[in-house]
Image: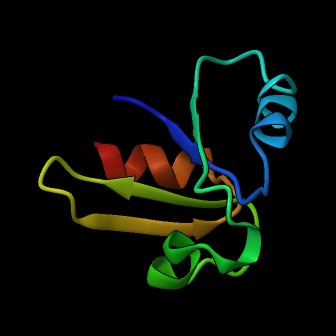
Amino acid sequence: MAIIVYYSVSTLDELKEFRNQYSDDYIFISELMSDYSPFKIKYGVQSTPTCFVIDRSGTVVLKTIGFNASQVKTTIN
């Protein structure tokens, strides 16, 4: 399982700065388009963090505002 963190920022430096706040080995991504991000629009992201669990077929099986570890674990199991 990989944890991918999407963060809506405008520059690569902002994304790197955000990434440096975490010691965990997450994958951090962004379109570098801030609030005009097609990802935010397509998936209805209104706040940060919004967490998704996506199955192997690419289907979103859970979307949460904030990170609820027990809810994610229940979905994964």
> Which of the image's four quarters has the N terminus?
top left
Residue 14 location (% of width, % of height): 85, 41
Q: Considering depth in this image, is 61 or 4 the residue closer to the camera?
A: 4
Looking at the image, residue 7 lies above or below residue 36: above
Most distant residue in the left direction: 57
**Left/right of residue 77 with respect to residue 9 in the rendered view:** left
Q: Quadrant of residue 51?
A: bottom right
Looking at the image, residue 62 lies above or below residue 70: below
Count of residue discs:
0
Residue 56 location (% of width, % of height): 16, 46
**Left/right of residue 8 with respect to residue 26 in the rendered view:** right
**Left/right of residue 6 with respect to residue 62 in the rendered view:** right
Q: Considering depth in this image, is 63 or 75 the residue closer to the camera?
A: 63
Please tell me which residue is depicted at 47% across the width and 59% down the height of the picture.
Answer: 52
Residue 49 location (% of width, % of height): 72, 59
Please tell me which residue is depicted at 31% across the width and 66% down the height of the picture.
Answer: 60
Please tell me which residue is depicted at 47% across the width and 78% down the height of the picture.
Answer: 43
Residue 42 location (% of width, % of height): 44, 82
Please tell me which residue is depicted at 76% across the width and 39% down the height of the picture.
Answer: 15
Q: Considering depth in this image, is 35 or 76 the residue closer to the camera?
A: 35
Scheme of image coloration: rainbow
> Which of the image's four quarters has the C terminus?
top left
